[in-house]
Image (spheres, coloured by chain):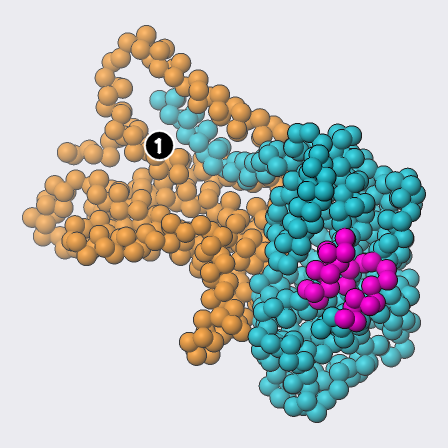
Chain colours: A orange, B cyan
Amino acid sequence: MSNAVSTAPKTATRGRTEGGQSGQRNAALAWLTLPALFFFLVFAVVPLAGVLILSFSSWDGIGAIGSAGMGNWFSVLADPGLYNALGLTFLIMIASWLVQTPISLLLGVFTAGSQRYRAALAVLYFLPLLLSSAAVAIAFKALLDPNFGLATGLGLPFLARDWLGVPHLALGLVIFVIAWQFVPFHTLIYQGGVRQIPKSLYEAAEIDGAGTIKQFFHITLPQLKYTIITSSTLMVVGSLTYFDLIFVLTGGGPGNSTRILALDMYLRGFRANLMGPASVIAVILVLIGLALALFLQRLGGKDKQGSQLEGM
Amino acid sequence: MKQPQTSRRSFLALAALTPFAAMTATACGTSGPGTSSAGGGASMWYLSGEPNQTTMQKAVDAFGSANPDNKIAVTYFQNDAYKTKTKTAIGAGQAPTIIYGWGGGTLKTYAEANQVDDLTSWFEENKDVKDKFFPSSFGAATVNGKIYALPNQYVAPIVLFYNKELFEKAGAQPPKTWDDVMSLVKTFNDMGVAPFSLGGQSRWTSMMWLEYLLDRIGGAEVFNAIFEGKPNAWMDPAVIETGTKIQELVSADGFIKGFSSIAADSNADQALLFTGKAAMMLHGSWTYGAMKKGGQNFVQDGKLGFVQFPTVAGGKGDPKNGVGNPAQYMSISSKATDQEKETAKKFFKDGILTETVIDTYINSGSVPIVNGIEDKLNASPDKDFLNFVYDLAKNAPNFQQSWDQALSPTAAEALLNNIDQLFLKSITPRQFAENMNATLGK
């Protein structure tokens, strides 16, 4: 979420702030960050420090906290379960990106048009986003039930498969449901991005004789570069925290076939009473999240100085 | 240019931190209901869901009007959410006065962390309370020889249910031995009916099979050794034979297609039995009441059959042994004030399992853990089932508490995970034993 918000005002305010402001005003503005800094300390730094300390401790969540040294780290890093969870997390992340980006990009471009029916469609596309993940998971679980689900109800035997009971099917289904839930959100981001593109670019292209497809590849797509990066960052970092949906839909099963890192952390911490190892996984999650987010920002970083509205 | 850079980082850090935010939020969010009411009252957390919720509320109300100075405030939670919530609340020192639970390994972790009071001396002073309940119900309340919880509610053994109508159609008899089970699997598969219903996604449902099979094959001693954490206890040949038998049953299509995606919390597994899609189901006795309520006269019309778990040829276990939940339990938080503790004890003595409550349990198809209720059971329309459960619980030479409750939470979670994989055949019975052996003492 934060990124979607932060990129837009940045381009807008840059023009204003760069116009030779007095140092005094900048100093005054610095004070305004204090509340934010305070909340960041309380809600981000303190818990992070707490989790870091816990990752070197042994605690069952109830009794006294004891020191474990590097024990938790060694045992978690030696646990094949961690690599299974890591692999699944990255698999779901990549698959989600590959599935969601083209769909939401195209839908976003489509709904950015001005015809009235598109507005109505945009509302329909948007609906899944309004449902809570738990509700989505429960609904899909009921629909896909091999004995009492939609397939039996409608008499469609080819759909009556054990969707959530076969490892690779369950994994595919998780990716599908995630896409179903989050494509609307990214569509919205792309829709906004497309609407920011100056009309004059298209007018010029039309005069030069470029068709719709050419316009898409030579104007829309390059102009959406930052939107793509924003949306991808949210998708990639967000996929680290997919939890509720998978927890309700499959509980990590069958076997360990959908037990992603965030779920693994929860199950270790709160089901198995192993707060130390769970904290190790939490720290790993943070590191991966930070690394990925920074990497994605770097992708679009080189020409950040240049205005997106250049040529206007 | 630096400013936006840092703020973006912090945003990203925030985004990445969401998992901890969730962790800490659950830790802080419990302060509300845990802090008990002012005066001489006490607080209690209990499970939502009927018929037990109404029964408990009535008991608490009755106790409250008889003891206006010792009212008990109850908050209700859903089963799975409750388990996590109590654990977190106790860890945060915000537990309610009365902690409801299932005894066993979880109670042990509470007792060893000095979070619940030792009630041994109280039971000595109140012999009549102790003598009121089935002696077998105290096992799971006892940690290192001391009693930390009051047993209450009802006994819930695991029972082999079957659909009489389908058995008549097949001209078959309920299984007495494991060989019968395997031949019935063939009979029903040939008929196009699933032999066994199973809500395998819940995992503890699959566990019930292992509990009985291990008991019939190796006897009660095998799990007792595991429970006591004896070295290599899981490597007993009986464990491996149990796993092998399970995988044979899975391979023979013994369980309904798609069993690993069926969850027991929506009662879909029970529905498979009473709609005739599956012929048999191994499940807790508590499903009787639920099927009576939701099964469209399936129970009322006498179509539900029930038998003890079959024997295994050459097995060492006593065929009368039972497994399941010997009772439910209530402990007193050691963080509660003396007044709150007094109220809780008074409730334990006068408020719980009163005559009205006993009648309500019997009416809902459960056997309360109270001695001398034979007459009441015989007067019930469900007397066949109630007597069956009562005899099973009373005559069992060994009544094994459900493994996931008996073991520590750490071992229990590993167990459920490995059982899931055993049923999926993604690990061999030997790997199952080895994986579990690594959890001994944890």
Position of residue B272 relative to residue A46, above or below, is below
- Which segment is the magenta one? B353-379
Q: Is residue A14 visible?
A: yes
Q: Name the residue nearer the viewer: A211 or A189.
A: A189
Q: Nearer the viewer, residue B10 or B410?
A: B410
Tally of numbered tags? 1
Q: Is residue A284 left or right of residue A130?
A: right
- Return the residue nearer the eye: B312 or B28: B28
| Vertical side of A227 occupied by B134: above or below | below
Which residue is outermost to the front? B66
Residue A237 percent location from the top left of the image: 46, 42
Say which residue appears at 69% left-offset and 47% top-offset.
B62
Give coordinates of residue A135: x percent, y percent: 47, 54
| In-image side of B2 versus B229 (left or right) | left
Q: Quadrant of the N terminus of chain A?
A: top left
Tag 1 secondary structure: helix
* Quarter of the picture holding the C terminus of chain A: top left
Whether residue B104 appears in this view of the structure is no
Question: Does the magenta segment cover residue B122?
Answer: no
Q: Quadrant of residue B207?
A: bottom right
Residue at the image position 71 percent from the left and 34 percent from the top: B69
Identify the residue at image location x=59%, y=73%.
B295
Label 1 is found on which chain of the structure? A
Q: Position of residue A43 (x, y in %)?
A: 52, 28
Query: Does the segment drawn in magenta span residue B368?
Result: yes
Residue topped by disc 1 = A6
For badge 1, the amino acid type reads Ser
* Quadrant of the rendered image containing residue A258: bottom right
Residue at the spot 89% in from the left edge and 49% down from the top edge: B128
From the top left corner, tell me how far across and down residue A230 is, in percent: 36, 40
Above or below, A90 relative to B212 = above
Q: Would you place residue A126 above or below residue B201 in this image?
A: above
